[in-house]
Image (tube, grey):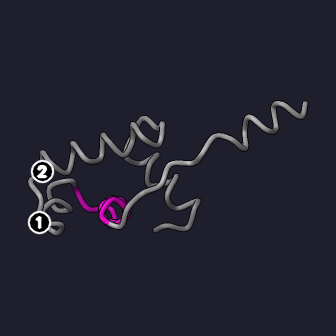
């Protein structure tokens, strides 16, 4: 039982930088990816690529799951 607890503690939670948090906050506000991209001065393709990278790093399947992940940690 102790080994399982130690294994869970050894796994580090992923971190998001400020730009990634701003991106997720835009998505959380309910705007489309195109609108969020314009607001962040990115192309829509770049925004989608960054969202996919965030999702992959967090181990979630969708941008909404990434938003929920960030909200639960009070990042947005």
Rounded to the nearest angstrom, the CA distance separating label 2 from label 1 is 9 Å
Quadrant in which the N terminus is drawn: top right
Of the numbered discs in the image, which one, if any, rests on residue 41?
Answer: 1
Q: Secondary structure at mark 1?
A: loop
Residue drawn at the location 39% of the way across and 36% of the way down: 56
Q: Position of residue 68 (x, y in %)?
A: 50, 54
The question of residue 27 being in magenta is answered with yes
- Residue projecting furthest to the right: 1
Residue 38 in percent (x, y) is at: 11, 64
Q: How many marks?
A: 2
- In-front residue for pair 46/18: 18
Depth order, front residue of 16/31? 16
Circles 2 and 1 in contact, beta carbons < 8 Å:
no
- Quadrant of res 4: top right
**72 sits to left or right of 7:** left
Instruction: Find residue 53 and report its horizontal and vertical position in percent.
Output: 31, 41
Q: Nearer the viewer, residue 7 or 41?
A: 7
Q: Nearer the viewer, residue 21 or 12?
A: 12
63 relative to 69 in the view: left or right: left
Callout 2 crowding tier (Cα within 10 Å): few <14, some 14–19, many ≥20? some
Is residue 52 in the magenta section?
no
The residue range painted magenta reads 19-32
Local SS, label 2 = helix
Disc number for residue 44: 2
Disc 1 packing (10 Å; few <14; some 14–19; many ≥20)? few
**What secondary structure predominates along the stretch shown in magenta?**
helix
């Amino acid at each position: 039982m102790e080994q399982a607890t130690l294994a869970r503690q050894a796994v580090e939670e992923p971190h998001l930088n400020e730009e990634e948090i701003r991106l997720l906050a835009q998505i959380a506000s309910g705007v489309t990816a195109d609108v969020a991209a314009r607001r962040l001065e990115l192309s829509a393709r770049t925004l989608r690529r960054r969202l996919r990278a965030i999702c992959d790093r967090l181990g979630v399947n969708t941008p909404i799951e990434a938003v929920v992940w960030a909200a639960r940690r009070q990042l947005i």
